[in-house]
Image (cartoon, grey):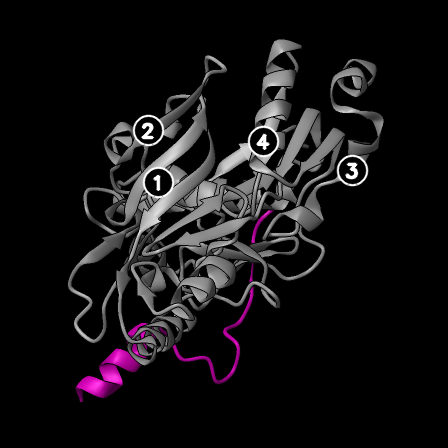
Amino acid sequence: MKRALENLLGKDCIRENVVLAPYTTMQLGGPADLFVEVTTADALAHAVKTVRELDLPYFLLGYGANVVVGDAGFRGVVIRNAGQNIDFRGNRVTAESGAIVYPDLIEASVTRSLSGLEHYVGIPSTVGGALWQNLHFLSPAPARERTMFIEEVLEHADLITEENDLRRVDVDYFEFGYDYSILHRRDDIVLRATFRLTPAQEPDLRKIMAENLAWRALRHPPLDTEPSVGSIFKKIQGIGAGRLIDECGLKGASFGGIVVTHRHANIMVNQGGGTAADVQALVAYIQKEVAAQTGYYLETEIDFIGEFDPPTSGSPVFVPRPPGLITAEELAARRAT
């Protein structure tokens, strides 16, 4: 497998047995058999086409959010997308799919007084990941009455399709929905995307960014100190999974180094030393408890990639709430009184 890849991609860009934990936001994951890092959209297309033609198992890794990699790693080729070129032409910006939405793309747009992307400040995602999930945020403040979607500013994107064709598609191709795009059911890979922005005053855009960052900070743990993958479970019939988990008294539940944060019941964080086996055990425990207490079965919205050891055995330990922590709901209640 390695020799075949070296013949087509070159020896210098292929590494063996690379531990994937440092490349994921939850800091989890064992070694990949082979690891290829690409730094341009063209190199990404070439790498994807090559592994497909060789019929090798592969996984495309971007920011590493919304994914849990098994402790035993990945048997195949991991292609890490680090193509981050950003190009502005008038009110349009074209970004390679490995470009980081925040801070890189948003800051570059806002400093040019261009509006349309500032709503998604603070969300860990690449451009490719943003289109995969139709990146969204409840904005603007203070009412936060509607959800803003990345599809609203997308003009077109360049893909390598699942048939290995290079193709430019418009926004309608993606069949966007809430947390959904056609990329969920087709193995198309985004190479680059072009967004149509609108002129605005930079101070106004920075005000929106500051408001959204503050709103998000009350609900999401900081990744640098509390590694996570974001929301674990899907909504059910309009009912937030976090609400159900909280009503079942499961904040603070933990297996090993993985705990349900007291900030938000639908987010688990790695306190240090956590494993994918701990995540599996905690997910199963929450699903069982919520089903028993409410009758609802929670489905995960994150991807589980690679080979997994058996889930951590035993019963959960409940971690006490950190002193001084105020949740968004508590702050809202205080302001209402």
Upstream in sequence: badge 2 or badge 4:
4
Q: Nearer the viewer, mark 2 or mark 1?
A: 2
Q: Name the residue carrying label 3.
A: 18
Asked whether disc 2 touches disc 4, contact meaning CB atoms under 8 Å apart, the reply is no
Q: Is residue 313 visible?
A: no
Asked whether disc 3 touches disc 1, contact meaning CB atoms under 8 Å apart, the reply is no
Q: Nearer the viewer, mark 2 or mark 3?
A: 2
Circle 3 packing at 10 Å, graded few (<14), some (14-19), many (20+), is some
Q: Name the residue carrying label 4.
A: 42
Q: Nearer the viewer, mark 3 or mark 1?
A: 3
Residue 321: percent from left, percent from top: 50, 73
Q: Which mark is residue 298?
A: 1
Q: Amino acid at mark 2?
A: Val
Question: Residue lying farthest bottom?
Answer: 337
Q: Amino acid at mark 1?
A: Leu
Q: Which mark is residue 169?
A: 2
Residue at 62 percent of width and 23 percent of height: 46
Upstream in sequence: badge 2 or badge 3:
3
Q: Quadrant of residue 247?
A: bottom left
Q: Amino acid at mark 3?
A: Val
Distance between the Cα atoms at labels 4 and 1? Answer: 39 Å
